[in-house]
């Protein structure tokens, strides 16, 4: 999935705004994580869950990327069921290292 495929016509203004913001985060990896999550979950989230989701969205994209990919530990204030649900939507992007490249493509000569 590379972009918005869900119609927002049936959503209230708050959910429409959140859905739009999820697909326009700033870095593509976070667009994919947040966008996929919002497309699948936004209509069924309670007001309390939306509040928590917007709190998560307020974090910096670079930080979120590191936490979701496991490059950095998730801070205590984000160790919540909502953050865990969001992480399930992470696309397949691995941290690129020399070791991971060698594993995929063989050692460099």
Image: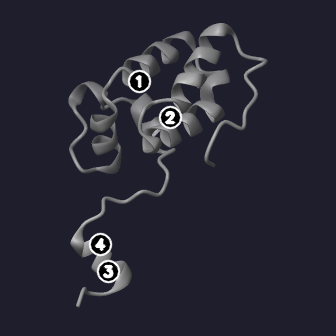
Relative image position of residue 73 (x, y in whole percent): 21, 43
Mark 4 neighbour density, 10 Å: few (under 14) some (14–19) many (20 or more)? few
Q: Which mark is on residue 72? A: none
Residue sitting at the far bottom = 109
Mark nearer the N terminus (1 vs 2): 2
Mark 3 neighbour density, 10 Å: few (under 14) some (14–19) many (20 or more)? few
Marks 4/3: CA–CA distance: 5 Å
CB-based contact (under 8 Å), mark 4 and mark 1: no
Locate residue 7 relative to residue 44 in the image: left or right: right
Marks 1/2: CA–CA distance: 8 Å
- Label 1 belongs to which residue? 57
Mark nearer the N terminus (2 vs 3): 2
Marks 3/1: CA–CA distance: 34 Å
- Label 3 belongs to which residue? 103
- Label 4 belongs to which residue? 100
Mark nearer the N terminus (4 vs 1): 1
Marks 2/3: CA–CA distance: 29 Å
- Label 2 belongs to which residue? 34
């Amino acid at each position: 999935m590379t972009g918005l495929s869900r119609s927002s016509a049936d959503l209230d203004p708050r959910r429409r705004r959140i859905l739009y913001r999820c697909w326009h985060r700033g870095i593509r990896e976070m667009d994919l994580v947040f966008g996929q999550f919002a497309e699948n979950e936004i209509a069924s989230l309670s007001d309390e869950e939306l509040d928590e989701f917007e709190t998560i969205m307020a974090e910096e994209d670079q930080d979120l990327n590191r936490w979701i990919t496991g490059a950095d530990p998730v801070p205590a204030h984000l160790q919540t069921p909502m953050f865990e649900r969001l992480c399930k939507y992470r696309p397949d992007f691995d941290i690129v290292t020399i070791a991971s490249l060698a594993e995929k493509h063989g050692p460099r000569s």
